[in-house]
Amino acid sequence: MANLLQIGTSGVLGHQQMLQTTGNNISNVNTDGYSRQRTQHNSQTDNMGLARSVTGREINKFAQAELLIDTSAFSNKEKFLAEITRTDQVLSDKSNNMAAGVSQLFESFHTANDDPTSISNRQLAISDAKTLAASFRNVGEQLNSQAKTANSEIAEKPALLNSLIQEVHGFNKQIMIAENTSRGASGTLLDQRDVAIGALAKEVDISTIINDNKSISINLLNGQPLVMQNSVSQFSAIGADPDPSNMELVLNIDRNTMPLQNVNLGGRVGALMEFRDETVYSSLREIGQLSLGIADAVNSQNKMGLDINGEIGKDIYTIPPTQAKHYAGNSNPAHVISSQIIAGEGSALTTSQYQVSMTSPLTFDVYEIKNGERSANPLAVNGAYPGPVEVTDHGFEIDFSAAAGGFQSGDKFLMSPTLFNLNDYDVANTQPEDLALASVLQSTTGPNNTTLSRIAVTQISDPRLSFANNDLNMTAPQQVSVNNSGDFDIFDGNGAYMATSSGALSGQALFSNAIPPLNPGVGYEIKMDGKPNPGETFSLSYNRDSIADNSNGLKLAGLENDDKLRKNHNNNGENQMTFAEGIATLISTVGNQTRSARVDSSANEAKLIQSQNWIESVSGVNLDEEAANMVRYEQAYNASAQVVSISKEIFDTILNAAR
């Protein structure tokens, strides 16, 4: 009888627990993060009936690991898409149409050329120049605002990350205590820890390790520990070196601080940093390159002409200098250096950054930083401390003179010549009369010339060298004669011989290639168009009747179609493009990145859904299945109760028979 009672009692208790588990599953069918629980029975090994029942979660550790990876990947792509979409909208917004502004500026130059004496036409050109500058400033302001927002969000991330890390660590403690009891850790407690881990995975890429005591250790994918068995690491946000306005994260492990500036954190945090560094700042440098390139081209060409008053042209645009960022380890934070575009070299500017490293108090190396990688060898420079020092073929010069007291070996600076305060970029205090539409020099051909060859002025570099009182100095080169060898003999205004340039240089600079050298000291340059015969002569003179001349204005308008902008990537050896192509490249680059981000987000969402479905197939609650189990367990419970009842009846019968 005792065996029959034991069998029935163990069955009642066991199936009661199964009914409770099934009821709990049904109650939590809509609870986020809940894993379906299952009660398992074991038969008595030395007797009849059920042994102790064990209730646990239905999980697949491989599915859980896959879900964490896919959660981080999707959160990263989703966040990046949300951020870059705003940049794409700014650049493609018609109200910020930089391409239309460039086109309108050069169209107004054409209009001014139609009547060089018209003040209203000249005013239109100046107004369009101001409108274009305002367009660059407006776009720059919006992108800078996006960078500030990203930095603010990054600065707030440690509070969330640290809270989640502490939460997981707290669950670990509770689970380890519960595991030392007869019941073990509840499924609800384990689920809550998994939810906290999943929330952490949305923010950064992590990997997990299940320890023997059922606690979970968490690391960043690069191996830095976040949650250990007995301690945790904590994040902090600090200003980056050398730009403190950029927020970076560091990890405080025990008493050690580990910088994460070069660690791909993944998740939403990684997306914010990628967006800020590779989209916003990259776009701002391209806008800086565009604005400086246009300003330098217009300024240089305007200074090659005469204004309506017969004066040498002036700068139309102001071009601000850029101050370099100093690294925290420098000997004196007050010591600064600055960069300035070299007049006439705007087409050589790149969107790269540069590191200036002092090798002694008076010597230095300059390295190019492109796509985050520093060049292996220093760049060639022309000049010496304190400068200005020209960085060869890069369109800018460095000035060290602002430092009081000098530098020390090891001092470093980060220089971004095209990343400057766009609020300082504007049209100078320019009047309509200052537009230099006329050529400063006019050329004439000799009466006995037999070809259509002519000389053309290609550059007015420094009018002070060869011009005075609205005229050419008599000692300046202004006559060219083709000798019997086909070379170009150069004479001054008095007819005195000065130098000779090779006849093979037709189409190239004559003065700078003359022997003996004429430059520096001339202030202008010419080239020969065509192939003249020996004996032909050419002369230059100051353009005194310039008021109705538009020859320099035509060159101003023609800048729109000139390759005056350096490409970031060479294509088939060609590294120059027009301003319109530069703007189109900027907009299309961000547009393509946005489109790619949208595809990546969709693909990662699909992958995440697959992982979630995998988890759901193992751990999800199926109401139909639970309802069927409820009926089955109820029947088993009733049957076990009947066994107990029968056992009691038999026992009572035996007692009655014994009386």
Image (cartoon, rainbow, N blue to C red):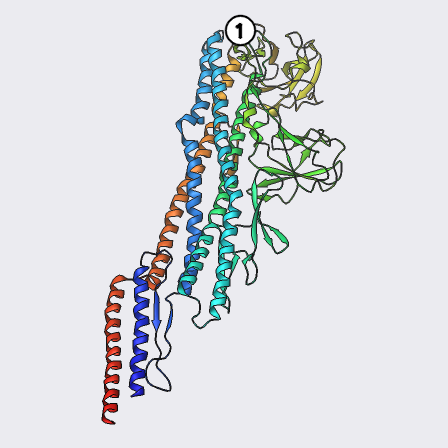
SS of the residue under disc 1:
loop
In the picture, measured across the screen, residue 476 lies left or right of residue 176, that is right
Provide the residue designation for mark 1.
547
Q: In terms of depth relative to the viewer, which is nearer, 40 or 285?
A: 40
Q: Residue furthest bottom?
A: 658
In the picture, measured across the screen, residue 421 lies left or right of residue 38, that is right
In the picture, measured across the screen, residue 187 lies left or right of residue 499, that is left
Residue 121's x, y, as percent? Answer: 46, 11
Residue type beneath disc 1: Ile
Q: Is residue 246 above or below residue 3?
A: above
Q: For the N terminus, give its image quadrant.
A: bottom left
Q: In terms of depth relative to the viewer, which is nearer, 441 or 239?
A: 239
Residue drawn at 69 percent across, 21 percent down: 520
Residue 439's x, y, as percent? Answer: 56, 12
Q: In terms of depth relative to the viewer, which is nearer, 399 or 8?
A: 8
Residue 311's x, y, as percent? Answer: 60, 9
> Residue 433 falls in which quadrant of the image?
top right
Q: For the C terminus, give its image quadrant.
A: bottom left
Q: Is residue 584 visible?
A: yes
Q: Is residue 433 above or below residue 13?
A: above
